[in-house]
Amino acid sequence: MRLTLIKPTIGRPTHSLYVDEARMEPLNLGVLAALTPPDVDVVMYDDRCEPIPYHQPTDLVAITVETYTARRSYEIAAEYRRRGVPVIMGGFQPTFVPDECAEHADSVFIGDAETVWASVIDDARRGALKPVYRGEPGRPQTGVLTRRDIFEGKGYLPVSLMQFTRGCRFVCDFCAVTRYFDRKHHIRAIDETLAEIENQKRKLVFFVDDNIASNRQALKELCRALIPLRINWVSQASLDVTADAELMKLMVDSGCLGHIMGFESITRDSVREARKAPNMPRFDQYATQIAILREHGLQTWAAFTLGYDHDTVDSVRATLEFALKHRFTFAAFNILMPYPNTPLYDRLTREGRHLYDGKWWLHPEYRFNDCAFVPARMTPDQLTDVCYEARREFNRIPSMLWRFSDLKTNMRTLTRMRAFWQFTPVFRREVFKKHGMVFGHFGHR
Ligand code: SF4
């Protein structure tokens, strides 16, 4: 039996072939490959960087689908199904909108794959795929090490992705993690996490946890175990981690270079509206938290979500000033997006504020980074434009040099300097390449 795994791209700019230079290993497909019995021949194609050979014989196609890649995923599925090959879809989009995905696939996988994937393969061998499979959310990869051989030769950024925990104890209004994991935090065994690190060659690891600091005790134990390995690592963490001095020191001692951190907004009312609890206890415009991050030399990727009901064109511009003032290694000025099955999505539905029929991810008129709802104090176009303006200004070459020149963070060590120049220019290019991108490859105007 042959299994074909597919990582779809978002789409492409209107007139050119798009290759995602910032692509990282699709960890979930490496896990799926590892969960597959060894007698099955597994191949993986990454639509972000290579053509998909639809003509190549295969018995089952598994596509990982996110909201942004849904339209392209449905195109790919149609190509395979036209050739009589069964398609199963898994990931966030099938988990949150299974009925939509079921229209484009033979089978939909809801939830985590670990406990159920073997029965999917059994059913596929017998030609008896079920229309729906459900896997309970739980610990990442118990007893399973990611198969990284399927990543070889695909030109991924030189960082190894892995997972220590899943889920988060907070309930931010816009975040899909909240409902997926129901506030639970599932933690991988430390010895298995260490084995995962030792089972690959790189010295830079990205823990793609939703919030690696959701359980501080667990993170402390991981940090202690990482110290002898002498690696560098990055992850995603909520800002409240700065309140724990012991943990901050342990992170640095264990090789942490920094985190993606959700600041979301510099406006107190917007933070409250987002229900971003980890940002609230000492809301002094983040002065305390940023000072602690800088003292520890952490390189921060600041994530903002812009377009709350208290936000204005001026407050978005003030956010740009804030990001430049603090010389963040990188900053993402994301428009607040109503992802399906989030509290935010439901609220905008109740208030009749969706654009694009409430399904921006499928709408032929929608473009990457467009606002998809009616903001309270701006027009949708104003929000789209001012967020682009913030990205453009933050990513100007003089801005990059200014940010790099921070002696406490980006210039603190050679390793940090190298990390800045290895990754920041790539992310910068992708910001401009992705802006206005058409979703999918076909069927747009
Ligand atoms: S802290 Fe982060 S991961 Fe947790 S609910 Fe909020 S946005 Fe989601």
Image: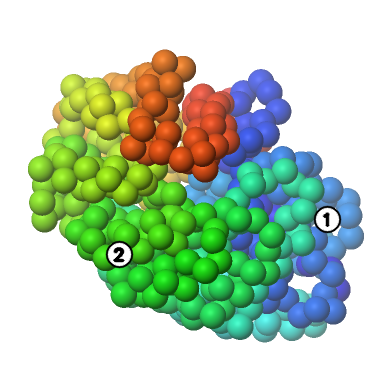
Q: Quadrant of residue 253?
A: bottom left
Please identify the quadrant where the N terminus is shown.
bottom right
Please identify the quadrant where the C terminus is shown.
top right
Q: Position of residue 316 (x, y in %)?
A: 24, 27
Q: Position of residue 358 (x, y in %)?
A: 37, 44
Q: In the image shown, does 334 or 69 lie closer to the viewer?
A: 334
Q: Quadrant of residue 171?
A: bottom left
Q: In the image shown, does 174 or 258 lie closer to the viewer?
A: 258
Relative horizontal placement of residue 180, taking residue 129 as reference (left or right) = left
Residue tagged by mark 2? Answer: 247
Circle 1: residue type: Arg
Q: In the image shown, does 19 or 328 lie closer to the viewer?
A: 328
Circle 2: residue type: Leu
Dot 2 or dot 1, earlier in sequence: 1
Q: How is the image coloured?
A: rainbow
Residue tagged by mark 1? Answer: 83
Relative horizontal placement of residue 279, taking residue 113 as reference (left or right) = left
Q: Is the residue under label 1 in contact with that under label 2 (CB below 8 Å)? A: no
Tell me which residue sits at (24%, 43%) in the image. 290
Q: Position of residue 25 (x, y in %)?
A: 64, 53
Question: In this picture, is 201 found above or below 406?
Answer: below
